[in-house]
Image (cartoon, rainbow, N blue to C red):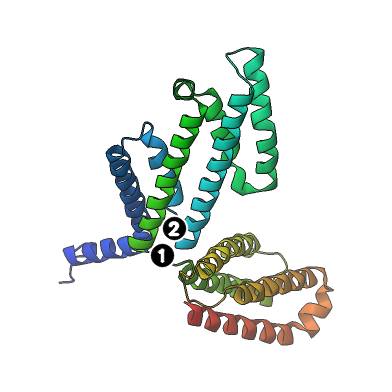
Amino acid sequence: MAPPTDSPTSRTERLRRALDRQRPRLTQAVRMTAASLATFGLAESLDLPQAYWAVITALIVTQSSIGGSLKAALDRFLGSVVGACYGGAVAFAIPHHGGASTFAALFVAVAPLTVAAAVSAGFRIAPITAIIVLLSTTGSTLGPLAFALDRIFEIGLGCVVGLAVSLLVAPARAARAVTVQAAGLARLLADQLEALARLDIEETPEAKALPPAVRRSLGRLETLAGEAARERRSRLSAAPDPDPLLRTLMRLRHDLVMLRRAVAEADADVLRVHLAEAWGNAANTAATRLRALAEALA
């Protein structure tokens, strides 16, 4: 008799494969949970008045790679310092107790910081922090200076713990993610070349879905390359510079865009009768080479 198709062994194997696929997400969940619990414990031991700000910051800072955590920590801390200091200064300079005075103080506090946030994404948290310092009831009780200092300390604690967890709990290097993402992008480019090699009169839905997929994959690779470069600058990684790999894949993607346009606009008889064999050989050879490069990267 044939063995049952849903034996305990097969179920265990399926579960193992499912866990392997979800391992990065599960690891990130463990890191975020550890960061939030550790931050809460430290905030309680230090008797911080609003410990939840430190916990929220630790969750935001704990990214999927060390490079991402570094950027999130720097942006969060600098933005909070600027917002808290400027909001506290406005609160001292413009006494406000509701009505027109509060409206004026809010305008003076928010308008310049929103301009800074529009210029640099690193200041996005600054106007939010200034509003909290200016309008919070706790701030009016403690005074703007004490409240701003508490806010900076809470944010700093969350940044430090989030970075520490990213470095110590199953650390994920962006450099490794760069090569994995580059391998996936090379496979997508190979798929696109093979679709172009067939010279279909009308593109199939699968072929039409490839250019947007390539564009999304390239955008993700740009983000990871930036994180990997940040790890190198911080001496947290000795991996090669990811920029040459990124530039090469961007050029290949641009070449494919031009080839796709050329195939779409070429004379059908010339392309499919006189050039079909030579073009098919060239495109399939290039796709095979890209797949070999993808395997080497992976």
* Residue at figure coordinates x 38%, y 62% from the top left: 167
Asked whether the viewer can see residue 54, the reply is: yes
Asked whether the viewer can see residue 198, the reply is: no
Q: Nearer the viewer, residue 94 or 201?
A: 94
| Residue beneath disc 1 | 172
Residue 62 at x, y = what percent? 42, 52
Q: Quadrant of the N terminus?
A: bottom left
* Residue at figure coordinates x 55%, y 47% from the top left: 78
Q: Which of marks 2 and 1 is nearer the N terminus?
A: 2
- Rendered view: 103 above or below 155: above
Q: Which of 155 and 35 is in front in this view?
A: 155
| Residue beneath disc 2 | 64
What's the amino acid at mark 2?
A: Ser
Circles 2 and 1: CB atoms closer than 8 Å: yes
Residue 103 at x, y = what percent? 65, 19
Residue 101 at x, y = what percent? 65, 16
Left or right? Give the position of 43 relative to 140.
Answer: left
Q: Is mark 1 on a helix, strand or loop?
A: loop
